[in-house]
Image: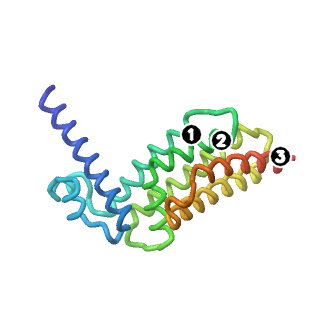
Amino acid sequence: MTTERKRRANGEESRRRILDAAAEIAGERGYDGASIAQVSARAGLPASSIYWHFKDKDELIAAVIERSFEQWLRAFDEHDERVPELVMRIGRALMRTPDFLRLGLMLTLEKRPREASARTMFLQVRATTLERIASTIREFAPTLADDAVSLLATYAMAAVDGFFVAHEIGGDSVDLAALFELHGKVLADAVRHVSA
């Protein structure tokens, strides 16, 4: 391996460790409870390494949101013929990579202007998600009017937000898999209902 390739690989590994640590700490303590010093300690890297990759904590949290979202978004790439199976796959992916939703909802609900990069990233993620959901609904029901597609997409995303909040409040007593299974069936019925 050349020196340049080794340096790049080390930089990518450091970035991954930093993002992993930041996701864990922000997930445990929220945006305000996370600090560069804590991320540094958890990642086992000096703070200067964090600042080499990220301008500040806000940019770091924005990168955590972006990475988690990109991992989750891959669930859309596997096409299913049926809505319930697609919703279950997307739900399982969300359970594996919840950081973008957890952190983004915290920042959005607080409506704080100081975390501009992280909040902006989450709002972009939401817009992309809404369009992906709408696009998927159009595939399943190509004759639906745009307003019906928009209504169903908004409903689908709002339900998932609610499931996630319910799980955060109720912990393991809230069966996310069962909720996503029910959601897939209800969404399929809603598509048929709106199509009629």
- Depth check: give the residue in front, 92 or 178: 178
Q: Earlier in the sequence, mark 3 or mark 2?
A: 2
Identify which amino acid the numbered label 2 is placed on: Thr
**What residue did someone put label 2 on?**
136
**What residue did someone put label 3 on?**
195
- Left or right of 77: which side holds 137? right
The quarter of the picture where residue 61 lies is bottom left
Classify mark 3: residues with Cα within 10 Å, few (<14), some (14-19) or many (20+): some
- Depth check: give the residue in front, 95 or 66: 95
Give coordinates of residue 62: x percent, y percent: 38, 57
Cα distance, mark 3 to mark 1? 23 Å
Q: 45 above or below 103?
A: above
Q: Secondary structure at mark 1?
A: helix
Residue at point 44%, 43% (across, down): 71
- Depth check: give the residue in front, 90 or 10: 90
Where is the N terminus found, in terms of image quarters? top left
Give coordinates of residue 27: x percent, y percent: 38, 61
Classify mark 2: residues with Cα within 10 Å, few (<14), some (14-19) or many (20+): some
Name the residue at the front extreme. 173
Identify which amino acid the numbered label 3 is placed on: Ser
Residue at point 21%, 36% (across, down): 9
Name the residue at the right extreme. 196
Identify which amino acid the numbered label 1 is placed on: Phe
Q: Earlier in the sequence, mark 3 or mark 1?
A: 1
Give coordinates of residue 14: x percent, y percent: 22, 46
Name the residue at the left extreme. 3
- Left or right of 10: which side holds 79? right
The quarter of the picture where residue 29 lies is bottom left
- Labels in figure, total: 3
Q: 194 above or below 167?
A: above
- Marks 2 and 1 close (CB-CB < 8 Å): yes
Residue at point 65%, 42% (across, down): 135
